[in-house]
Image (cartoon, grey):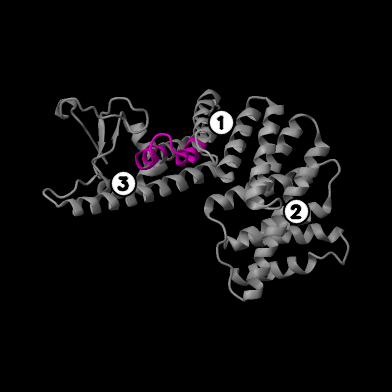
């Protein structure tokens, strides 16, 4: 997987640096031959995070143009190289997001760093396309408790946004959401709420007030209000989040029912994990509340059942469908969800036979 390199064998003035820490490298990947590490630990970390998925692609990206080719051929080679770099950026971005959703923050860093370096090569060092990479690096460092490092990445993201007139609302909502996370982690709850309010504003402008994207800002605001000992405000925000997700998931199921097709995966792995974590958190909060709201618990269990059905995990879909069935027993016989829950259970059981 790697072999030791001799610094004396490098061309004059060329230093090989570690992919992760930029210290002098001692090892080289034996497969791509273009990635270097200071020690085996950093190589293993990078392999797990991202390198295993991109190692062959790095070989083709670093391949030089054939010697003696014409200018048109060189232009073609350059365009193909840029396409591969853009594909590499996409892979690194998705992998970093996946590790964030799983809260494996140490694994986020190599993928996000590769994302940042490749984006700089393709778009330049001041482009707004770098902001998502800065935000992922900031989220990872917040999760690891390295708040000063997170602040540094967010400062770079803010500066880049300020230098980009007409920056999209998507980028602005993501920036304010990450700033809100940092301020909440620092105990600066008032400024955290301000950033989350901006997050909700920009997300609603882009995706709509009732979208699940916007509801993520409400969820984070509710967490801050709980820390401020304002449970009533948090409860109202949690209800908004639960309603947004339930409406969205029910609509997806209705669309599938009308088309008569089998449910396809509507969420990638990162989206499914994030939605599951949020909905489970809300359900656990309801179950532990001194004033439980059975209708909210039924809605959340039903949402989780639909989520896993759409992700083709019929075991979990059945688990939460049965949970919703038990919870709804205490509600009115005319409750509108009763039939939907029964249909979902039957659907999941059919696929598990």
Answer with the quarter of the image where residue 109 lies. top left
Question: Of all residues shown, which one is farthest toward the front?
Answer: 165
Q: Which residue is disc 2 drawn over?
A: 243
Q: Are marks 3 and 2 in contact (CB under 8 Å)?
A: no
Question: From the viewer's perspective, is residue 56 above or below residue 42?
Answer: below
Secondary structure character of the magenta stretch overall: helix
* Label located before the other in sequence (3 or 1): 3
**Residue 345 placed where, x, y %?**
69, 67
Is 172 part of what is drawn in magenta?
no
Q: CA distance from mark 3 to mark 2?
A: 43 Å
Q: CA distance from mark 3 to mark 1?
A: 28 Å
Q: Residue at x 19, y 46 (%)?
A: 64
Q: Quadrant of the N terminus?
A: top left
Question: Of all residues shown, which one is farthest toward the right?
Answer: 332
Q: CA distance from mark 1 to mark 2?
A: 29 Å
Disc 1 secondary structure class: helix
One can see residue 320 in this view: no
Magenta highlight range: 116-135
Q: Nearer the viewer, mark 3 or mark 2?
A: 2
Q: Quadrant of the C terminus?
A: bottom right
Q: Which residue is disc 1 drawn over?
A: 142
Q: Is residue 224 left or right of residue 19?
A: right
Q: Residue at x 42, y 45 (%)?
A: 92
Q: Which residue is disc 3 drawn over?
A: 55
Answer with the quarter of the image where residue 225 lies. top right
């Amino acid at each position: 997987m790697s072999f030791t390199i001799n610094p004396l064998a490098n061309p004059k003035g060329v230093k090989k640096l570690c992919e992760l820490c930029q210290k002098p490298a001692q090892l080289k990947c034996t497969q791509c031959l273009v990635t270097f590490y200071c020690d085996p630990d950093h190589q293993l970390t990078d392999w797990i995070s991202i390198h295993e998925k991109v190692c062959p692609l790095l070989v083709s990206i670093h391949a030089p143009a054939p010697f003696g080719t014409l200018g048109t051929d060189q232009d073609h080679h350059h365009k193909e190289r840029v396409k591969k770099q853009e594909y590499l950026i996409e892979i690194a971005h998705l992998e970093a997001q996946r590790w964030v959703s799983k809260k494996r923050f140490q694994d986020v860093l190599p993928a996000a760093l590769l994302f940042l370096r490749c984006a700089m090569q393709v778009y330049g060092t001041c482009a707004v396309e770098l902001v998502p990479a800065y935000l992922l690096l900031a989220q990872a460092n917040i999760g690891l408790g390295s708040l000063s490092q997170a602040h540094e990445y967010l400062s770079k993201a803010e500066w880049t946004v300020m230098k980009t007139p007409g920056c999209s609302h998507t980028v602005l909502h993501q920036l304010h959401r990450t700033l809100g996370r940092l301020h909440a982690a620092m105990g600066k709850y008032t400024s955290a709420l301000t950033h989350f309010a901006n997050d909700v504003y920009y997300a609603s402008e882009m995706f709509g007030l009732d979208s699940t994207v916007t509801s993520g800002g409400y969820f984070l605001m509710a967490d801050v209000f709980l820390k401020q000992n304002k449970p009533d405000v948090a409860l109202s925000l949690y209800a908004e989040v639960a309603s947004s997700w339930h409406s969205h998931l029910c609509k997806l199921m209705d669309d599938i029912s009308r088309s008569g097709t089998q449910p396809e995966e509507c969420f990638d792995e990162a989206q499914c994990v994030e939605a599951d974590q949020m909905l489970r958190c809300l359900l656990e909060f309801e179950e532990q509340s001194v004033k439980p709201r059975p209708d909210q618990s039924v809605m959340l269990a039903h949402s989780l059942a639909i989520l896993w059905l759409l992700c083709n995990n019929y075991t979990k879909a059945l688990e939460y469908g049965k949970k919703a069935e038990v919870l709804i027993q205490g509600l009115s016989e005319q409750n509108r969800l009763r039939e939907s829950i029964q249909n979902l259970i039957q659907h999941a059981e059919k696929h598990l036979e």
